[in-house]
Amino acid sequence: MPAVNSQPRRAHSGNQRDEAARLAVLHAADDLLVEHGFAKLTIEAIAREAGVAKQTIYRWWPSKVEILLDTLIEDSEKRFPVPAEKSTMDAVRGYFRGFARFVTRDPAGKVLLALIAEAQHSPETAKSLHDRYLGPRRELERDLLARGIEAGEISPALDLDAALDAVVGPIVYRALTGASVPRALVDALFDGLFKP
């Protein structure tokens, strides 16, 4: 008769992520992207930098795009959230000024720009970027503007989506081309489209 193990069996963790390893992967991807760019960013390099096995990464993420999206989502929520309460003219203008700083100075902003650039060549990246980041964030931004309109603080010259595109588009264009985004430009865009 085989010996019976009296120790209780541990539940199999499957794809459950170790938080420290997950954060190490996200930070490594972010750092390597800023240092070397999207094209040279590899799963092997991320694994080496994070101190985890390549198989661990592939078990948790199907691609480097999904790793970068997780990084972008987490960093955006921490460092550049969409205001949830205030929708004063100053708060909305401050949000767009913050966006300009985010895409020109913050490493997470560089991740966003890299994913936007990659989305031009990859329909899968474009869909993932829209579904996981741009779409949900746009809903929060629309809400911010709608509250400002209801409060009589702002009055968009265009519908909400067109107004958001008209402010965000030039900021992203300048950031993608390596140009600075002066505060005066952000203010001029905001005032031309939202000032009551």
Image: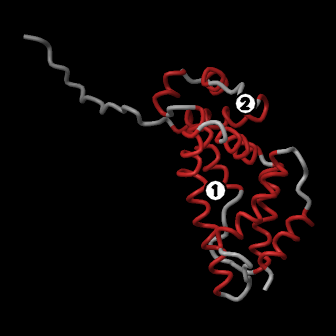
Q: Amino acid at mark 1?
A: Glu
For label 1, count other residues whose C-alpha is less than 10 Å away and answer few (under 14), some (14-19) or many (20+).
few
**Residue 92 vertical position relative to residue 55 in the rendered view, above or below:** below
Q: 38 and 67: which one is in front?
A: 38
Where does residue 128 sit, x and y in percent of width and height? 54, 45
Q: Which residue is mark 1?
A: 77
How many marks the image carries: the answer is 2
**Which picture quadrant has residue 156?**
bottom right
For label 2, count other residues whose C-alpha is less than 10 Å away and answer few (under 14), some (14-19) or many (20+).
some
Where does residue 102 sit, x and y in percent of width and height? 78, 54
Q: Residue at x 90, y 48 (%)?
A: 179
Q: Residue at x 60, y 25 (%)?
A: 43
Query: In the current view of this chain or complex, which residue is farthest to the bottom?
Result: 152
**Residue 186 vertical position relative to residue 177 in the rendered view, above or below:** below
Secondary-structure class at tag 2: helix
**Residue 173 vertical position relative to residue 18 in the rendered view, above or below:** below
Q: Which residue is mark 2?
A: 32
Q: Is residue 189 left or right of residue 120?
A: right
Quadrant in the picture for the C terminus:
bottom right
Q: Amino acid at mark 2?
A: Leu
Q: Residue at x 85, y 44 (%)?
A: 177
**Which picture quadrant has residue 135?**
bottom right
Query: In the current view of this chain or complex, which residue is farthest to the left?
Result: 1
Where does residue 16 sit, x and y in percent of width and height? 42, 36
